[in-house]
Amino acid sequence: MNKRIAKKHLKVVSAIIIAPFVVKIGFNDRSKQVIDFGEWMKNQPKGIYDELTEEHQFSSEMRIEDGNLVWGNNWLISFDVMNYYHGDLFGYYE
């Protein structure tokens, strides 16, 4: 990360699939982070995320909305922007 930015001002501005379930995310402070969602997707129980377990669905459903990276209708998958920023889907960041 180039500099510390306040959470309320941090936004996702770009997202590119660079490998199966791996996304390069750009932020409004010009920093970038690469996150592999593959392991997380693989460990989800059958049911709610099934539509996104196929690579083409994962990439076609991905979008930036309100400064966050989300998938599916009604933000079926979304994490806090700070988690993306720190490259850790499960950490807690203020």
Image: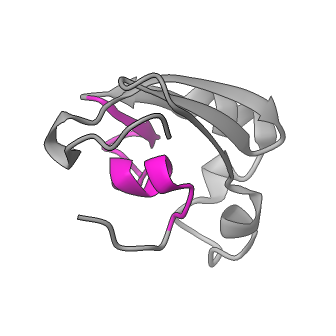
User: Which residue is at the front of the view, 78 or 9?
Assistant: 9
- Decide if residue 31 is on the left or right side of residue 42: left
- Decide if residue 19 is on the left or right side of residue 43: right
Q: Residue at x 68, y 63 (%)?
A: 41
Magenta-colored stretch includes residue 75: yes
Q: Quadrant of residue 73?
A: top left
Q: Is residue 35 above or below residue 83?
A: above
Q: Residue at x 35, y 45 (%)?
A: 75
Quadrant of the rendering where the C terminus is positioned: bottom left
x and y, in percent, of residue 15 in the image: 57, 26
Q: Residue at x 27, y 40 (%)?
A: 5
User: Which residue is at the front of the view, 69 or 82?
Assistant: 82
Q: Is residue 66 above or below residue 50?
A: above
In the picture as drawn, the residue positioned furthest to the front comes out as 3
User: Which residue is at the front of the view, 30 or 42?
Assistant: 30
Q: Residue at x 32, y 44 (%)?
A: 4
x and y, in percent, of residue 59 in the image: 67, 31
x and y, in percent, of residue 85 in the image: 46, 47
User: Which residue is at the front of the view, 36 or 27?
Assistant: 27
Q: Is residue 3 above or below residue 45?
A: above
Magenta-colored stretch includes residue 48: no
Q: Quadrant of residue 47?
A: bottom right
The colour scheme of the drawn protein is one colour
In the picture as drawn, the residue positioned furthest to the left comes out as 8
Q: How many numbered marks have been drawn onto this rendered protein structure?
A: 0
Magenta residues span 67-89
x and y, in percent, of residue 46 in the image: 65, 74
